[in-house]
Structures are given as structure tokens and as C-alpha cells.
Image (cartoon, helix red, strand yellow):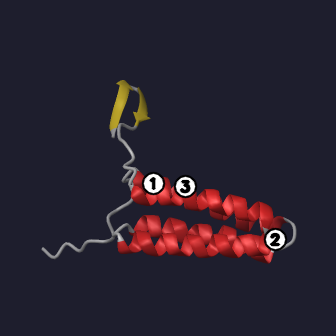
Amino acid sequence: MTWSGCPGRSRFRFRGTIDVDQFDYTVVAGFGLLLVVSVVAETALAGAAFGGFLLSLSVWRLYDGRPWEAIAWLIWVGAAVALVLTPAGVAFLVLFFGSLLCGTAVLFASRFNLLPNIWTVDRS
């Protein structure tokens, strides 16, 4: 990350890339399959399948040593819970869109290395 611009008028510019691995391709394929299931099945069934898929993604990322991404996927489970429980009115909007927004923020912050390393222990 670098700061660029003139003195007194600086702006933040990120220079970096997001590494895409085989797991990311699995996620895209899984979401595509869940999209097809959501058209055919009931909302509660599709939400339960979505939640199970997200939980498995979280475990895979935790096992891979990426705890922040695992937390992001767990936050998105809240969106799946909202689809299954379907609370009335504003509660649904807050639970569903709040989970999506927070999960997305944590996922991108993790991918751009903006969050602290909580996985390794410095024993010096």
C-alpha cells in the first residue's frame, strides 16, 4: 500500500493483487449450483443448503490457515439463517443485508492484508 499525491492533498491508493486459488473456483461453482437449486427448491431448503455450504467453506478456510476468511464465511451463515427463518420486516433486512455487508468487508479486508495476523504466535 502506498500513499500518493501532493503534500496536503494525499489520497490512499492500494497497489496489490488478490491471489485466486482452487478454493475460489470451487466457491464460484458452488454458488452457481446453489443458484440453480434456489430456482427449483423452496426458500427454506435453499437457505439450509446455502448455510451448509457456507459452513463447509468456513471450515476449509480455517483448515487452510486463513482465520479471517473463515470468520467472513461464518458471518455469511447469518444471511442463510435469515433465509431459513424469514423474520418479519426490518429484522430480515438487518439480519440478511447486515450479514452480507459485514462478511464482505471482512473477506476483502482479509484478502488485502488489512487485518492483523491472528494465526501465528510470536514467542520472542
Residues at marks 2 and 1 touching, judged by CB atoms closer than 8 Å: no
For residue 109, the mark is 1
In percent of the image, x 43 and y 72: which residue is there? 60
Q: Secondary structure at mark 2?
A: loop
- Identify whether 17 is placed above or below 76: above
Residues at marks 1 and 3 touching, judged by CB atoms closer than 8 Å: no
Q: Quadrant of residue 97?
A: bottom right
The tag earlier along the polypeptide, 2 or 1, is 2
Residue annotated with mark 3: 28
The local crowd at label 2, few if under 14, some if 14 to 19, many if 20 or more residues have their Cα within 10 Å, is: few
Q: Position of residue 39 (x, y in %)?
A: 78, 60
Q: Secondary structure at mark 3?
A: helix
The tag earlier along the polypeptide, 3 or 2, is 3
Q: Quadrant of residue 34?
A: bottom right
Name the one closer to the observer, 20 or 115. 20
- Residue type, numbered disc 3: Val
Residue annotated with mark 2: 42
The tag earlier along the polypeptide, 1 or 3, is 3
| Rendered-image quadrant of the C terminus | bottom left
- Identify whether 87 is placed above or below 116: below
In percent of the image, x 55 and y 75: which residue is there? 55
